[in-house]
Amino acid sequence: MTLYDQSIQLLIDSQTASGAIIASAEFPSYRFSWFRDSSYIAYAQCRVGRFQQARDYFIWAAQTVRRFAWKADRAIANITAGKRLGPDDYLHTRYTADGLEDENQWWDFQLDGYGTWLWALGEYVELAQDGAILDEIADEVRVVYRYLSHLWQQPNYDCWEELSQYLHNYSLAAIHAGLQATAQLLPDLAQDAAGVTTAIRELMLTEGVCDGRFSKSFALKQPPQSILQTPQTVYHDATTDEQMRQGAEASLIGLATPYAVFSADNPHLQATLDQLEAMLHRPNGGVYRYLGDTYYGGGEWVLLAAWLGWHYAKIGRIEEAKKLKSWVEAQADENGYLPEQVSDHLLAPDRIAEWRDRWGSVAKPLTWSHAMYLILCEELKRYE
């Protein structure tokens, strides 16, 4: 079985009867469904023609939103009234397969996953030609739209679940794409969405640019009061905050691919991607998250290599995309499983032991890694 076929099968095996998509069944801390990971995985299902599996996920996610819509309503009401929220007054970032909140503490106030869900839903409707799904989940789409359009300026955890005291360009891009997708799905929201997305773009261009590049994260000059009453634990070194906020950051690929917040010739975007290539793409290897990464020693992430390859394929840099595809394929083990990250060339080798002691070996297989590989394969097919 080829890695392509193995990856499709893994996506099937990682989806439960409820429709939830599990991040990694073999890694205890990842036996949950993240809106972020799962929405990319559902998009990959669409790209390989597995529309029913993608539909099952979107229905499951909508049911989960329906169950906790009261939290979104309460968050909006309190933010509108200028009140401070507690550490559980928001929609969570990951859920059990039954669509329930995890009893263990997690870094849950993250907005990007909900933006990605709306974006991926828009892609599903277009690719599957299934506008009828909105007859079932339009109310929940509106809940998420209202939630994001009211809370997008609130500091929250980034896509790597760090730096909760800042805003993040990747997260803003995901929200921007999600609101735009909603405007296409529900045209009565188009005028409101245009106003919010314009404000997001303006903020990214003013406060989110440093030295001519989009920064990973930034603080508002006049920030709203943090909605978190008590900070949650983080696992990065405080001394690296400045580097983490202003340095190269792999998730910023998302500003171009898939979210297309700015055109490919935008000078800030070009400079951002140039820095990413120079600092995070290891020659003939994978892609690091950022230079201050210490999670499992800071290895090369398989899904990021596929993501950069996806971007290269979209802009016509086919040979570079193929090289990244070959590197990803070389990381599969004898079972055809792709890990979350590869530990051959660590940024912080002295930090891997603490994570192994805490959570065991690096997650493998990681469903998101396989999904991004499939997306890269499908993107390259356009040129074959």
Image (cartoon, rainbow, N blue to C red):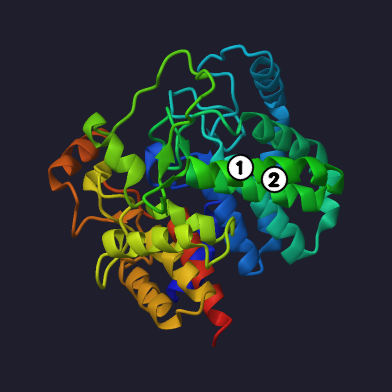
Disc ID at residue 179: 2
Picture quadrant of residue 150 = top right
Q: Is residue 371 above or below residue 237?
A: below
- In the rendered image, which residue does mark 1 sit on? 200
220 vs 149, left or right, is left
Q: Nearer the viewer, mark 1 or mark 2?
A: 1
Indicate the quadrant where residue 96 lies. Answer: top right
Q: Amino acid at mark 2?
A: Leu
Which disc is residue 92 wearing?
Answer: none
Please tell me whether residue 84 is drawn above or below residue 324 in the rendered image. above
Query: Which of the two labelled residues, at mark 1 and mark 2, occupies the earlier sequence position?
Result: 2
Residue 147 locus on image (x, y percent) = 68, 31
Callout 2 secondary element: helix
Note whether 194 is above or below 7 in the view shown. above
Callout 1–callout 2 Cβ contact below 8 Å = yes
Residue 364 can be seen, yes or no? yes
Amino acid under disc 1:
Ile
Q: Is residue 22 visible?
A: no
Q: Position of residue 264 (x, y in %)?
A: 53, 67
Residue occupying the point 72% across, 66% down: 127
Q: Is residue 90 left or right of residue 331?
A: right
- Which quadrant does the C terminus fall into? bottom right
Q: Count residues near mark 1 (Cα–Cα under 10 Å), then give few for <14, some for 14-19, many for 20+.
A: many
Residue drawn at x 35%, y 40% is 245
Give the residue at x 52% y 52%: 14
Q: Where does the image place residue 153, in percent across and percent down from the top left?
A: 57, 31
Q: Residues within 10 Å of mark 2 (few under 14, many from 20)?
A: many
Q: Nearer the viewer, residue 54 or 307?
A: 307
The residue lying at 30 percent from left, 55 percent from top is 288
